[in-house]
Amino acid sequence: MRRLLHHISMMAVFAVVWIILEEQFSLTTVAVGSLIGLLTMIVTNRYVLRADYESDYRLGLWVGVRYVASLIIQIYVAGIQALIKVLRGQVHVGIVDVHTTLESDFHIALLANSITLTPGTVTLERYGNNLRVIWIDCVTTDPEVAGPMIKQNFERMISGGKS
Amino acid sequence: MAQIAHLIGQILIGIGLVFMAFGIYSVLRFRDFYSRVVITAKVDTVGFLTLIFGAMLIEGFSFFTLKLALIVVFELLTSPISTHSIAHSAYASGYRIRKDVRVD
């Protein structure tokens, strides 16, 4: 039942994208969009992914929307901070390891993306459950202290949005 | 009303272009590779987003705006990946942080 619900919600997302690209809202576009969404999911499930579709892309729709909204706010904060750094010209670059409690690959990739977009940090590489991060004003290299400062609340938001 | 939205949209596009210009300036200003990567990634993303929001305001609510929203989503997904791959390739080929990071 849960599986079916997940498939239907993914199909709705694909149909909306199709309608936007097709530039008209009618019964035909909805039907064709859902059909193509279903076909995409079947092909991806069978030939591209090693695991199951819904175990790989487990992110609720509402969580996703809230995540994007808070990401955009963080990007603006990051941009203005970077602008100040450019003008003052003072940087102290360092490389820090950050530990994450997220489990699936997709969630870790999302966390790495949001670390890259948020103020002053870029993800370098990942090994297991650790991310290596460049930090532009490196206060400390201790992973325990640096972790919460770099991750902010994105980890909690991605893992289910219980905040 | 439409004219006010048009004006604000054009101002937003101008702000976005200013951000992008600062991104180019920061490449010339910093000497260290990693600080260049970090700063330009942020400033460019902010500039691009501001530009797209300005175009959205000018157009009003239509399918074109929704397409721009799709572009924003893809930008949010792909921009950090390109930054990450550049930084990762530098790190993997043995580039480390220089001790004498000077700025002039």
Image (cartoon, coloured by chain):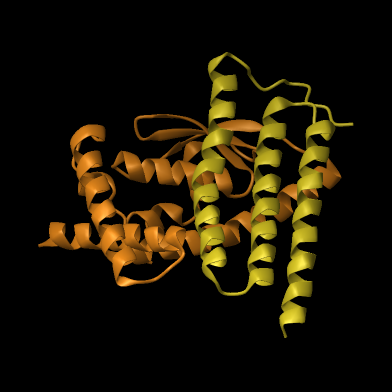
Chain colours: A orange, B yellow
Q: How many marks?
A: 0
Residue found farthest to the front:
A28
Camera-nearest residue between A45 and A145: A45
Residue found farthest to the bottom:
B1
On the question of residue B97 being in view, the answer is: yes
- x and y percent of residue B12 in the render? 75, 64
Camera-nearest residue between A97 and A144: A97
- x and y percent of residue B7 in the render? 79, 73
Name the residue at 71% across, 52% down: B47
Question: Which image quarter is the N terminus of chain A in?
Answer: bottom left
Camera-nearest residue between A73 and A101: A73
Q: Is residue B34 above or below residue A10?
A: above
Question: Which image quarter is the C terminus of chain A in?
Answer: bottom left
- x and y percent of residue A140 in the render? 60, 38
Residue found farthest to the top:
B94
Q: Is residue A63 left or right of residue B54?
A: left
Say which quarter of the image contains residue B39: top right
Q: Is residue B47 left or right of residue B79?
A: right
- x and y percent of residue A136 in the render? 67, 38
Name the residue at 34% across, 43% down: A106
Q: Is residue B54 above or below residue A79?
A: below
Q: Is residue A159 left or right of residue A22?
A: left
Name the residue at 54% across, 25% down: B88
On the question of residue A161 being in view, the answer is: no
Residue found farthest to the left:
A1
Q: Is residue A67 above or below residue A113?
A: below
Q: Is residue B40 above or below residue B61?
A: above
Say which quarter of the image contains residue B80: top right
Say which quarter of the image contains residue A17: bottom left
Name the residue at 48% across, 37% down: A143
